[in-house]
Amino acid sequence: MMRKADISRKTGETDISLSLNLDGTGQSKIDTGAGFLNHMLSSFARHGRFDLVIKAVGDVDVDYHHTTEDVGIVLGEAFLKTLNDKRGIKRFGSATIPMDEALSLVALDFSGREYTVFKAAFHSEKVGDFDTELVEEFFRGFARGAKCNIHVRLLDGGNSHHAIESIFKAFAKAAQMAVSLDGHDDIPSTKGVL
């Protein structure tokens, strides 16, 4: 079974095309117009072992808000499409990942229900020219597109770059766990549907 998806989304603010292979090797080609977001998504692909191609054109002359949120939505939609009826997946995933002084926990559930809990306070308002408050917008967008529950907690961290990167690495490992196949050909829910 090939777990791949190609998604496109065009609005008055962004034009995004994305290709995702859940069973890849961690290869990526990311161009969002936001250097730090590119770096985080490349790290996500590498550590989740997802093959990921993203081309996003947005109103970055305003700021990176719309691009960041919409990339999250489209990535979530790609996960939702590749998982189909979610037959055979583990469904739940969590990871706690350090990066130097930073420590982050991400837990998610591909439940079919959108919910985001984001508890992270960063020491700086920007990393380069990227607003740190947009990290939460990315994860809210992902949960919306994937119809999943996601909890993000920054447990410790001083350097905002390290803190955010530890979050994205934890997200990668939690997602990798949740979408992995458990050897059973059933839908992981007592309802029989997700």
Image (spheres, rainbow, N blue to C red):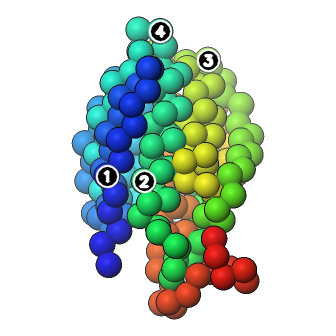
Q: Counting other residues with Cα less than 10 Å from the Cα at mark 4, is it few (<14), some (14-19), or many (20 or more)?
A: few
> Residue at label 4?
62
Q: What residue type is labelled 3?
A: Glu
Q: Counting other residues with Cα less than 10 Å from the Cα at mark 1, is it few (<14), some (14-19), or many (20 or more)?
A: some
> Residue at label 3?
125
Circle 3 SS class? loop
Residue 33 in percent (x, y) is at: 34, 23
Q: What residue type is labelled 2?
A: Ala
Residue in the picture at 47% in, 9% down = 62
Circle 2 SS class? helix
Residue 28 sits above or below residue 83 on the image: above
Residue 36 sits above or below residue 95 on the image: above
Residue 130 in percent (x, y) is at: 49, 20
Residue 123 sits above or below residue 93 on the image: above
C-alpha distance separating marks 1 and 3: 33 Å
Q: Which amino acid does label 1 sit on?
A: Asp
